[in-house]
Image (tube, rainbow, N blue to C red):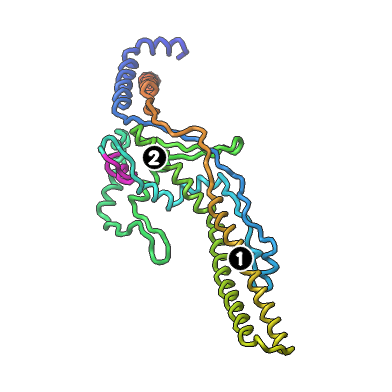
Amino acid sequence: MNYTEVFIRLWTERKTIFKYMLVFLLIGLVIAIVTPKKYTVTTVIVPQLSSTQNFKLGNLSSLASLAGIDLSSLSSTEAISPLMYPKIVESLPFQIDLMKSTFYYKRAGKAISLMDYYKIYRKKSPIGVFAKYTFGLPSLILEKLKSKDISKTSNTSDSLLVINKDIEEIMKYLEKDISIEVNIKFGYVSLTGTFDDPVFTAHVVNHLKNLLQTYITKYKIERAMAKLKFVSERYNEKKAEFEEAQRRLALFRDRNKNVRTEIVRAEEERLTAEYNLAFNVYNELATQLEQAQIAVKEDTPIFTVIEPTKVPYKKSAPKRFFIIFVFTILGVCAGTGHVFYRMLDINLFSKR
């Protein structure tokens, strides 16, 4: 059979192909209509990567070393690389905080958490529902037969996070609906969210940006806070030593006002030297403590917003015309395949 005969046969069976195309077109039309609308919001930020110059040790190291204090471990705080941002967003503590955050949802008429959104209010795709209760029915039955999972999302005594199946499923949904992209070449970060309500989507993306900045701030100033704590502890210790040295020197002078012996003079010089050393270390630590407190405040990272969060007025999905077009093409292919199958079947039968 040559190409001309094939074309003639396809033209003869054009009604069959048209029927298939019509059926698939109707299926595509139904799917396009019942598929929930999706709205996408993207905000673009530029993180400030310049490290704040922290306090310098100066002469404190030499003075503190005389008192048995090692301050060589204190160094400047470094900025967190934007390459770590996706890992922060994917981390379990971040995801749980995001799930517990509440946003106004029009369908509910109130503010709801992301956890409630996915468990109660999220519009489900008809294809997903069909797949769940057909192909996924065996797994659903097995889950019902199993004992209830008693694990809850909580902090255990050994600081381990335990999650249940619901949290794990919601994390998978979040992975699809929320994304973060780091552009190394131009130095910006894009945060994107996709949900079925425009206002809800804008609120989620805006909170995602704020929550990310909160976590980065916490990680970034952690070292500065540790330094502040260290200096504060040393300051309190040396303050007590200075006050004790001051008390001993004053008490010695009061007791020996009219005594002028070499032994008294030597003891007074010794007590004065202890007092001066304690005062110098204490004074340097007081200055260092003030600088450390300023450094903690200045280390808070700042995001420059290039593309602000805005409420979309156009849906991003579903692409209804594209869905109908794809199903129409599938109908044509299915009809053509059916015709070819009949032609092949006839040829095989005629050879016999």
| 93 shown above or below 106 | below
Mark 1: which secondary structure? helix
Amino acid at the residue labelled 2: Val
- Residue 189 drawn above or below residue 238: above
- In the rendered image, the vertical position of residue 150 relative to residue 326, given as above or below: below
Q: Which residues are magenta?
A: 110-122
Magenta stretch, main secondary structure class? helix
Q: Residue at x 64, y 69 (%)?
A: 281
- Mark 1 Cα-neighbour bin, 10 Å: few <14, some 14–19, many ≥20: many
User: In terms of image quadrants, where is residue 172?
Assistant: top left
- Left-right relation of 67 to 195: right
- Taking 250 as reference, is 130 left or right? left
Q: Is residue 335 magenta?
A: no
Residue with the mark numbered 1 = 285
Instruction: State the residue in front, 110 or 152.
Output: 110
Query: What's the residue at 54%, 47% (across, down)?
Result: 301
Gap in angstroms between the C-alphas marked 1 and 2: 45 Å
In the figure, 150 relative to 47: above or below?
A: below
Whether residue 342 is visible: no
Residue found 52% across the figure and 53% down from its top: 219
**According to the image, label 2 marks what residue?**
204
Query: Does dot 2 land on a helix, a strand or a loop?
Result: helix
Amino acid, disc 1: Leu
Q: Position of residue 135 (x, y in %)?
A: 31, 40
Tell me the mark number nearer the camera, choosing from 1 and 2.
Answer: 1
Residue 276 at x, y = what percent? 67, 73
Image spot of residue 132 (x, y percent): 30, 40
